[in-house]
Image (cartoon, helix red, strand yellow):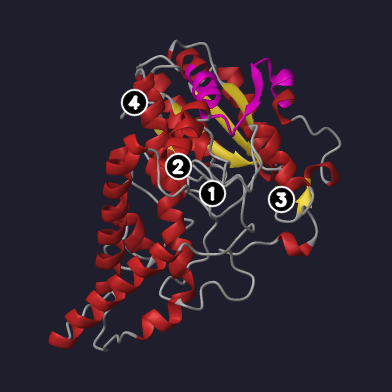
Amino acid sequence: MPSPTSPDLGRKLFRDMLRIRRVEDRIKAMYHLREMRSPPHLCMGHEGIAVGVCATLGRRDVIYPYYRSHGWYLAKGGDLNAMMAELFGRATGCSRGWGGSMHLIDLAAGVMGTSAIVGGTISHAAGAGLTFQMRGQSRVAVVAFGDGATEEGVFHETLNFAALRRLPVVFVCENNLYATNTHIRERQAQTEIYRHAERFGMPGVAADGNDVTEVHAQAARAVARARAGEGPTLIEFQTYRILEHCGVNEDHDLGYRTEEFPAFYSRSSGLPVDITVESPEEAAEIASRHWRCGITSAVLVCVPVPAEFELPAAEIERAIEQAVEEASLAAVRGKKLTPFLLAQMERITAGRTLQTNRALLINNASVAAKIAKSLNKSEPRLTR
């Protein structure tokens, strides 16, 4: 594994974050077409945590994410086509079309299944850790959850059991401050989540979840400790979600976090959240200084992307387009689709949704046109 500051690792981390963001950009753009009927919990703003942690894991290590799971699934190597098909409710999906966005699984990649239940996978990770320990295997289980899950009894019970048995488990809390719309200070008397580790005699760490190199460094220490038989670690990564709790829209008009949103990212990234990138050179310079996941209009969604990422970015877009097209084609059950999708997509920017990149709109319209052209030739009848 390269050192946390190596150029090769930096490029990998950036590419993986970019891939997750572009996938969710596409989900966001297409959700209003109503082909995806599963409510998505997008991880925009959280990408650095999943990417940084998973970069420290081996193929045989396992993760147990929660319902905000797209980033974790992809960062651990989950199959993009199977994930997209799942979001469309297809039989080719990773959960055979019955689980949707909140129930993703790829056993071959070590994604052991996500859950819509708050805190639902925490004890599962301890069970996997106990299995590895009893079998004498050098494997680690990672469980991810939000700050709201720390209010569940299973969180405290599992930390106690894992510490008691010195299990090879890493507990990762993505603290984005809110359980839906309620701030942590209105829910918890003691808001420093990492300090819960103290009473169980395990290390507890707080770190910047928007600095992917820091995430990687902290996770690497915790994973190495678990693999060496020294027991579990609790890491609280402080982050912020960009969109609403569940869905593809902004929610800052609700007033519960309007003022603190830009302040958080400015503090985390050292850049204003509304920064404009004027040239490839400027984008490259920003990217070289900031391997961040929260710079919404600079690094992850800058156009054009830094020169060295032009090819990876194009490959990412092609893979996403293929996954979407295959999932959409699998939707046909004896009825034609027409180019009306283009008109539907023009409505994406209406109402409370964020401004959508025009190029992304064109890409999706192109997919719709291909689908319509294909269906005008034949009408395959696919069953679930």
What are the residue bounds of the magenta stretch? 196-220
Give residue 258's position: percent from left, percent from top: 77, 54
**Residue in view at x 46 percent, y 25 percent:** 130
Q: Earlier in the sequence, mark 1 or mark 3?
A: 1
In the visual, does 138 lie left or right of 245? left
Mark 4 vs mark 2: which is more N-terminal? Answer: 4
Q: Position of residue 124 (x, y in %)?
A: 50, 38
Q: Nearer the viewer, residue 60 or 69?
A: 69
- Residue that mark 3 sits on: 179
User: Above or below — where is 92 with respect to 175?
Assistant: below
User: In the rendered structure, which amino acid carries the disc numbered 4?
Assistant: Gly
Instruction: Tell me if residue 59 comes above or below residue 244 in the rendering.
Output: above
Tag 1: residue type?
A: Cys
Q: Which residue is mark 1?
A: 43
Instruction: Give the residue displayed 49% in from the left and 42% down from the top.
Output: 65
Label 2, residues with CA under 10 Å away: few <14, some 14-19, many ≥20: many
Q: CA distance from mark 4 to mark 3?
A: 31 Å
Q: At which x and y percent is residue 293? A: 53, 39
Give the SS element for disc 4. Answer: loop
Tag 2: amino acid: Trp
Foreground tag (1 vs 3) = 1
